[in-house]
Image (cartoon, helix red, strand yellow):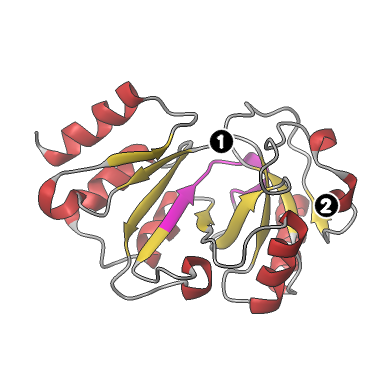
Amino acid sequence: MDGESGNFDACIASGGVALFPADTVYGLACAPEDPAAIERLYALKGRAPEKAAAVMFFALLPALGALPELGPRTREAVTRLLPGAVTLLVPNPQRRFPLTCRADPDTLGIRVVDVPELRDAGYAVLQSSANRSGEPPPRRLADVIPEIRQRVEFTVDGGDLPGIASTVVDLRQYELEGRWRVVRQGAVGPEDLSAALVSSSGR
């Protein structure tokens, strides 16, 4: 595991694109502040350049530390849902990670995953699923098309994954109004979301 994490670190730090297992599907990762690496990742996917991507952390504390301006209600919701198979859209008043936000710098998508091979990675990556845009996300390394597998700098094989993409939840109105909405249905269902978010909102 230490070797995997160290090689992953080196790949990201040197401007490479890594192929790795999340808690849902296989993904691509690169440094979130490296324009050239981001351009390569988008090109591998065929992703529209204006489309935002999420920032991923491999532990909760680095994620909370990177976003100190999160309000207490939103911060509690984040700690209830993450790590987990959700992507949270949160307010971004400091416009952090602008290259990931693209046309909407006031909104940031965040994920925190628990990947045994990468638990020592204490930094953020820009991440997106390891498929061509519009195609199904891969649950096995063998499902990743050769055009992607052969052009990344480092690969972590995590075996078979659930194969269901993360649920995307909009928390931008949560701090002041306790309101949230599901933008994309995925691995976490409405009952689990309600259990966490109604408790956090105090409603």
Q: Is residue 148 above or below residue 185?
A: below
Q: Residue at x 9, y 33 (%)?
A: 203
Q: In the figure, residue 72 lies in which quadrant?
A: bottom left
Residue situated in front as seen by the camera: 85 or 68 = 85
Is residue 117 a member of the stretch shown in magenta? yes
Horizontally, residue 193 falls left or right of residue 27, namely left
Relative to the observer, which residue lies in front, 15 or 138? 138
The kind of secondary structure element at disc 1 is loop
Which amino acid type is shown beneath numbered disc 1? Ala
User: Distance between the Cα atoms at labels 1 and 2?
Assistant: 19 Å
- Going 78% across and 53% down the picture, which residue do you hit? 3
Q: Which mark is residue 165?
A: 1
Q: As shown in the figure, which amino acid type bears the numbered disc 2?
A: Ile
Q: Which residues are magenta?
A: 109-119
x, y percent for residue 42? 68, 62
Residue at horizontal 26 percent and vertical 67 percent from the top: 69
